[in-house]
Amino acid sequence: MTLALYGKSRRRKGALLTAALLAVIVATVGALGAITSAFAHHGTRSPGSGMHC
């Protein structure tokens, strides 16, 4: 990333850093969403499943 910023204007550096930060946030939210949806059906009990306490 530092080589991508070398020699760029201050405005261009800000835009590149903002884009990189946004990409990290989107990837994190996507990964958390995938993990959550993978485990969402694992331990759920539906009313008609016959698992009553």
Image (spheres, helix red, strand yellow):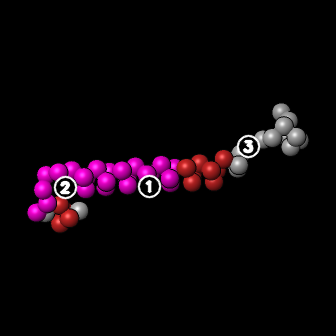
Q: Give the range drawn in magenta.
A: 7-32
The N terminus sits in image quarter: bottom left
Q: Badge 1: how crowded within 10 Å, few (<14), some, or many (20+)?
A: few
Which residue is drawn at the image coordinates 73% and 43% (left, top)?
44
- Expressed as whole percent of the image width and height from the top left, the position of residue 7 reads 10, 63
User: In this figure, which residue is indicated by the disc labeled 2?
Assistant: 12
Q: Please, what secondary structure does the residue beneath circle 1 have? A: helix
Q: Do the residues labelled 3 and 1 touch (CB within 8 Å)?
A: no
Q: How many labels does the image show?
A: 3
Residue pushed farthest top?
A: 53
Residue placed under numbered mark 1 in the picture? 27
Of the pair 44 and 24, the residue shown nearer to us:
24
User: Magenta stretch: residue 9 in it?
Assistant: yes
Mark before the other along the chain sequence, 3 or 1? 1
Which quadrant does the C terminus fall into?
top right
Disc number lying in front (2 or 3) = 2
How far apart are the alpha carbons under marks 3 and 1? Answer: 26 Å
Residue beneath disc 3 = 44
Answer with mark 1 or mark 2, whichever residue precedes in sequence: 2
Q: Are the residues at dot 2 and dot 3 in contact (C-beta closer than 8 Å)? A: no
Q: Distance between the residues labelled 2 and 3?
A: 48 Å
50 vs 2: above or below: above
Per the image, label 2 sits on a secondary structure element best described as helix
